[in-house]
Structure formats: structure tokens, C-alpha cells
Image: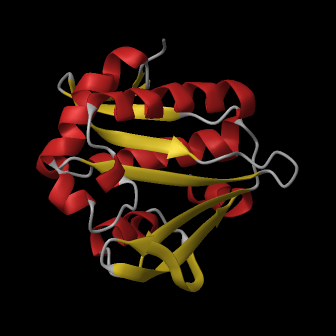
């Protein structure tokens, strides 16, 4: 298993089954915050659910090339970042991410996203990366904005969360744009 360092104390590692327990504990400890923005949180109620998520991520990666990585800070799992299914025909991919409560506001996710965008557009030679965030999730929206993504539009009532439907902001980055900003 590879490790990709972002700096002296943050690294990315593909999720493996041995990460299920710390990942479940992180999800559980951040449940109240995460459920505001992520529809899957309430369905993760026991370790087996997280283990199944990890198994599916590994399988999906083997079948499609998509990566799901744990974000580790000082050796502790802090969150997850992943490629959604890569559309190889159109050379595009979406990125999803989340952090545990105690890790937000430190620039960790911006660094992780920057690495994933760079990998997608420069190493995989994809043409487009997309990030979708609930319009009310200001912390999540700040990441693509900070990285220079273009707000392409709002998809109305596109995600069902426990509090009801929310609108999603759609951000895009093209390979040609990313090359100019590197």
C-alpha cells in the first residue's frame, strides 16, 4: 500500500480493511456534524457498515481505477477523500470528501483535494474534475473556491438529507485551467 505525503504530518493512504475500525470511530464521533451534509451517515451504525464501505471502495477501485483514501494526520485518521466513478470515455471524475470534527479548519482538506485534482488531471490525464457541495455547506464550498474551481451552477433539490432536500453547488475544473494555475 502506498502512502502519499502532503506535508510533514499529513498523508494519504488508500483505504484498507484494517482502517475500518478507526474510520468507524471517527464517523461516530463526528456524526452530528456529518449528518447535516452527508446522506449516508445515519446508515453507518456499526463497524460492519464501515467495513463494507471499505470493501466496496477497494472493489470499485479495482474495477474503475477510482481511489478512496484515508487522510491521516500525525498517524490518526482524519477523514476520507475519493474519486467517484471515473468516466473514462469523457475523461472526467467527481471528488467527494469529509473530515472528522477535530480536523476541520486546518487546511487539511484543501491540501488533499489539491493532490487529488493534480493526480486526476495530470497523471490520469482526465479533462475535468467536478465537486458538488450543498449550497449551505460553506466550509465544503470554500475548498473548490480556494483551488480556483468555477462555480458552474446550482442543481436544485438534488440531495436528500435528514432535514430534507438541499441544493447542490456544482464546481468544475478543466485540465487546461489547472495547467495554467500550477
Residue 121 image position (x, y, % from top left): 68, 47
Tally of marks: 0
* 31 vs 171, nearest the viewer: 31
- Residue 36 versus residue 52 in the image, above or below: below
Q: Is residue 72 left or right of residue 166?
A: left
The residue under the point 33% across, 67% down is 37
- Residue 8 versus residue 170 in the image, above or below: above
Residue 110 image position (x, y, % from top left): 36, 53
The residue under the point 23% across, 26% down is 22
Note whether residue 47 is visible: yes
The residue at the far top in this view is 1
Residue 54 image position (x, y, % from top left): 45, 29
Q: Is residue 65 left or right of residue 117?
A: right
- Residue 83 versus residue 23 in the image, above or below: below
Q: Is residue 122 left or right of residue 22?
A: right
Quarter where residue 39 is shown = bottom left
Residue 141 image position (x, y, % from top left): 39, 71
Quarter where residue 73 is shown = top left
Note whether residue 105 is visible: no
The residue under the point 48% across, 11% down is 1
The residue under the point 56% across, 48% down is 117
- Residue 82 versus residue 93 in the image, above or below: above
Give the color scheme: rainbow, by chain, secondary structure or one colour. secondary structure
Amino acid at each position: 500500500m502506498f502512502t502519499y505525503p502532503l506535508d510533514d504530518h499529513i498523508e494519504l493512504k488508500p483505504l484498507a480493511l484494517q482502517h475500518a475500525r478507526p474510520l468507524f470511530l471517527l464517523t461516530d464521533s463526528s456524526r452530528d456534524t456529518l449528518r447535516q451534509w452527508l446522506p449516508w451517515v445515519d446508515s453507518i451504525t456499526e463497524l460492519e457498515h464501515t467495513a463494507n464501505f471499505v470493501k466496496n471502495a477497494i472493489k470499485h477501485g479495482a474495477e474503475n481505477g477510482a481511489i478512496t483514501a484515508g487522510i491521516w494526520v500525525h498517524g490518526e485518521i482524519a477523514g476520507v477523500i475519493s474519486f467517484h466513478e471515473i468516466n473514462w470515455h469523457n475523461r472526467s471524475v467527481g471528488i467527494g470528501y469529509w473530515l472528522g470534527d477535530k480536523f476541520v479548519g486546518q487546511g487539511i482538506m484543501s491540501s488533499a483535494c489539491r493532490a487529488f485534482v493534480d493526480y486526476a488531471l495530470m497523471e490520469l490525464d482526465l479533462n475535468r474534475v467536478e465537486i458538488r457541495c450543498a449550497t449551505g455547506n460553506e466550509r465544503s464550498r470554500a475548498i473548490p473556491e480556494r483551488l480556483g474551481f468555477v462555480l458552474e451552477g446550482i442543481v436544485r433539490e438534488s440531495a436528500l438529507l435528514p432535514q430534507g432536500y438541499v441544493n447542490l453547488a456544482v464546481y468544475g475544473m478543466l485540465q487546461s485551467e489547472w495547467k495554467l494555475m500550477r
